[in-house]
Image: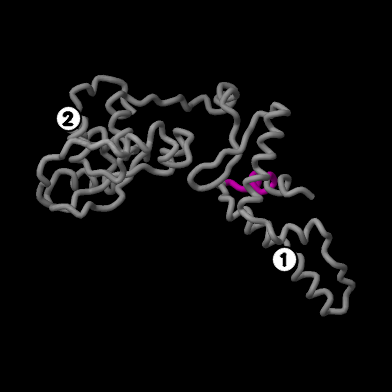
């Protein structure tokens, strides 16, 4: 039994992504289970033959072996023109339908239409993605306009979340991207963003002096966590298609 086939079976059976380390642990656990059964049967006086060589060899499975097996599977899928591939996301590996079959798969979900993001929303999300964790004041210093509405919409879409508070006067909230952000844009980490290293080093405009603890930014956070109503969009170009 090949490791690649075992990995494939685990990914098909799992509803959630599986990291390389977790896949390796599951494989080793199966070997340990088989050995425990063999020992127990031997102690009970039953016939307990040694484990097959291929199973014993799996006891040393590592995350590197898993990655190699997945590469082998993807190569096989591509050569045989299969409709799916295995991709790594922040939470691990998962089977996905290939992009070119998306229009057909979408017919399974006639009520769900692709949602487009407005220019202001994309700008706000890009600033957060590249410079996270970041405060609302820092975002507004870059964009030059109030971002309460855009931040609220991104919170509602679960593309960003509150990641804590900055060690600044007033302890302003920090915003960062969510796992759904990585899933939506098909990337594994922030380093996969275009020119991530260079853009994260660019000096940003200095935000105005920190406000008091009663800053409306706190009200925005409470609204996101406690009330379903979205904050009013304060963007001057709010007439564009929203997230």
Q: Residues within 10 Å of mark 1 (few under 14, many from 20)?
A: few
Query: In terms of secondary structure, where does tag 2 sit?
Result: loop
Tell me, yes or no, whether the highlighted magenta stretch contains residue 235: no
Is residue 61 found left or right of 93 in the rendered image? right
Residue pointed to by mark 2: 144
Q: Quadrant of the C terminus?
A: top left
Q: What segment is highlighted magenta in the picture?
A: 8-15
* Residue 93, position as x, y percentages in the image: 57, 44
* Mark 2 closeness class: few <14, some 14–19, many ≥20 residues within 10 Å: few
Q: Residue at the spot x=73%, y=28% of the render?
A: 80
The image shows residue 42 at horizontal and vertical percentages of 84, 76
- Above or below, 1 against 115 in this view is below
Q: CA distance from mark 1 to mark 2?
A: 61 Å
- Sequence-earlier tag: 1 or 2: 1
**Which sits in the foreground, 14 or 27?**
27
Question: Which element is circle 1 on?
Answer: helix
Residue found at x 26% / y 38%:
229
**Point 29% across, 35% down: residue:** 127
Which residue, given by chain and number where applicable, does mark 1 sit on?
Answer: 33
Q: Position of residue 116 (x, y in %)?
A: 38, 24
The majority secondary structure of the magenta stretch comes to helix
Could you tell me which residue is drawn at 17 percent across and 30 percent down? 145
């Amino acid at each position: 039994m090949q490791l690649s086939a075992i990995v494939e079976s685990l990914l098909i059976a799992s509803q959630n992504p599986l990291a390389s380390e977790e896949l390796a642990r599951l494989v080793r656990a199966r070997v340990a289970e088989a050995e425990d059964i063999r020992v127990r049967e031997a102690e009970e006086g039953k016939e307990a033959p040694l484990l097959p060589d291929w199973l014993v060899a799996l006891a040393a499975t590592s995350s590197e072996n898993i990655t190699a097996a997945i590469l082998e599977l993807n190569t096989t899928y591509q050569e045989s023109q299969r409709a799916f591939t295995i991709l790594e996301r922040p939470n691990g590996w998962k089977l996905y339908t290939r992009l070119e079959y998306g229009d057909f798969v979408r017919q399974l979900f006639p009520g769900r239409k692709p949602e487009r993001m407005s220019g202001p929303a994309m700008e706000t999300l890009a600033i957060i993605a590249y410079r996270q964790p970041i405060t609302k004041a820092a975002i507004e210093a870059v964009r030059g306009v109030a971002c309460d509405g855009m931040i609220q919409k991104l919170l509602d879409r679960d593309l960003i979340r509150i990641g804590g508070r900055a060690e600044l006067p007033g302890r302003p909230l920090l915003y960062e991207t969510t796992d759904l952000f990585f899933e939506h844009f098909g990337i594994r980490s922030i380093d996969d963003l275009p020119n991530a290293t260079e853009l994260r080093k660019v000096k940003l405009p200095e935000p105005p002096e920190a406000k008091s603890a009663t800053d409306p930014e706190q009200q925005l956070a409470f609204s996101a966590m406690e009330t379903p109503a979205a904050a009013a969009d304060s963007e001057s170009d709010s007439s564009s298609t929203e997230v």
